[in-house]
Amino acid sequence: MFYNWAQIASGMAFLASLNFVHRDLATRNCLVGEGFTIKIADFGMSRNLYAGDYYRIQGRAVLPIRWMAWECILMGKFTMASDVWAFGVTLWEILMLCQEQPYSQLTDEAVIENAGEFFRHQGKQVYLSRPPTCPLAVYEMMLRCWAREAKDRPSFQHLHCFLAEDALNMV
């Protein structure tokens, strides 16, 4: 399973090397092909199947707020670091076997309020819980993906190395 996660990190590292910001990384946008090769795409909004994953902001933009970094939700600022945040959420989805939507206990409005808690930085923000099958070191890496400051989040290159090499020692 670590190999699959590493493939996603590798694909995102490639996109980052091209200065490309995906803006909608989630399991719904990961295509699993022959030999379990994972390709990153953007299928999310193309099917009604995923309509519940997107939130319509005052009749305008439709956004996947449960995967978005706080700065994307509050300031509309999308960067490679915000893609790293979404990568952490994507790993959470995989570890939960895609059986639960991120922050399922929160309404869309509460997810937006939680983004405000990250902004205010007073210790009231809610993180996704550690999935039952998640090794502690992987969850700690996921928490780094959700660091308040974008500069404190790991790069996709670092994430790829961690998942391709270090994670093998956790099996």
Image (cartoon, helix red, strand yellow):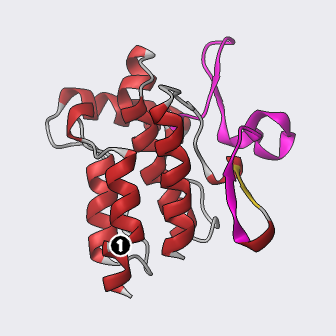
Q: Is residue 103 visible?
A: no
Q: Give the magenta range.
A: 36-65
Query: How many numbered circles does the render carry?
Result: 1
- Amino acid type indicated by mark 1: Glu
Quadrant for the N terminus, please.
bottom right
The location of residue 121, given as percent across then percent down, is 17, 33
Nearest the camera: 113 or 98? 98
Crowd tier of the residue under label 1, counting other residues whose Cα lies within 10 Å: few below 14, some 14–19, many 20 or above: some
140 with respect to 73 (left or right): left
Quadrant for the C terminus, please.
bottom left
Residue ID for mark 1: 165
Up the image or down, 122 lies above or below 157; here it is above
Nearest the camera: 169 or 97? 169
Q: Residue at x 46, y 44 (%)?
A: 13
Q: Quadrant of residue 60?
A: top right
- Residue 29 part of the magenta segment: no
Q: Quadrant of residue 55?
A: top right
Q: Residue at x 38, y 81 (%)?
A: 168
The location of residue 3, given as percent across then percent down, is 52, 72
Q: Residue at x 41, y 58 (%)?
A: 160
Q: Residue at x 34, y 78 (%)?
A: 135
163 with respect to 116 (left or right): right
Q: Is residue 20 visible?
A: yes
> Quick one: SS at disc 1?
loop
Up the image or down, 169 lies above or below 47; here it is below
